[in-house]
Amino acid sequence: MNEIRNLRKEYSASTLDICDVDASPFAQLEKWIKEAIKAEVLEPHAMCLSTVSAEGRPSSRIVLLRVLHEGKMGFFTNYRSRKASELGDGANVALNFFWAELERQVRIEGKVYKSSVENSDMYFQSRPPDSQIGAWASPQSQKLKDRAELEKLISDTQANFKNEPIPRPEFWGGYEVVSEAFEFWQGRPSRLHDRILYEMLDGHWQLSRLAP
């Protein structure tokens, strides 16, 4: 595909310097997410979650950040899914946000742990009823014969919970990432991008500039 060889875009929307960022990477991330929301970026809280299987096979998928509070970053999923099989307590994970409209990305590395039952319950009850039904109905990551099979599972689940409160399934809940490193990336002309690294060292975040 020769067309991709000549695709070029100069990044010049903004700059990034250590003097301008927050001392906390969580505060800096919150700032950038708010700016992405203001810029009406599509799914500003979408992030790529990368995991590694027991055999060393990496895999990535997009999930939605649902918790960013007091240093915690959380998302929710089916505990029987492929991703969950690679998310044992203390497993290493990587996250990546990319906001093309703002010429920015954030890379995060850390370890993942299951959320508390209370936090999972609270978030599940905040979901729309159709999403609650979907969590019960979908055998996530398992093979289906066709779309009709999924739709039948949904209709059967709707019938089971007709006119009743929908509890959180035990096989569905949250994860929280304990971050060890953040990299904030701002596109610059001629591929000479700004990159600011936060590393957790001796209980404190230390900042460095990385070469592009």
Image (cartoon, rainbow, N blue to C red):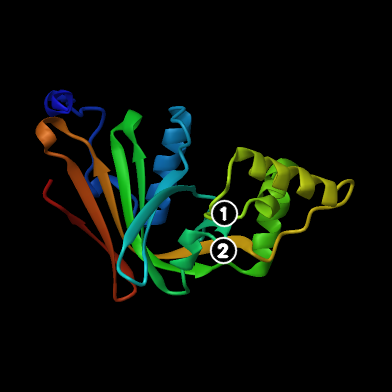
Residue that appears at 14% across and 30% down:
189
Q: Mark 1 points at which residue?
A: 140
**Percent x, y for residue 194?**
19, 43
What element does badge 1 sit on? loop
**Percent x, y for residue 54?**
36, 72
Q: Mark 2 points at which residue?
A: 80
Residue that appears at 50% across and 49% down:
65
Q: Return the residue nearer the eye: 136 or 203.
A: 136
Q: Residue 190 carries which label?
A: none
What amino acid is labelled 2 in the image?
Arg
Badge 1: residue crowd in 10 Å (few <14, some 14–19, many ≥20): some
Residue 129 left/right relative to 38: right
Residue that appears at 72% across and 43% down:
152
Residue 103 left/right relative to 80: left
Label 2 with label 1: CB-CB less than 8 Å: yes
Residue 18 left/right relative to 129: left
Q: Return the residue nearer the eye: 87 or 180.
A: 87
**Percent x, y for residue 139?**
61, 55
Examine the image and state in which quarter residue 3 appears.
top left
What element does badge 2 sit on? loop
Q: Distance between the residues labelled 2 and 1?
A: 7 Å
Pointer 2 or 1: first along the chain: 2
**Percent x, y for residue 94?**
35, 58
Residue that appears at 52% across and 57% down:
74
On screen, residue 185 above or below 23: above
How many numbered badges does the structure rendering display?
2
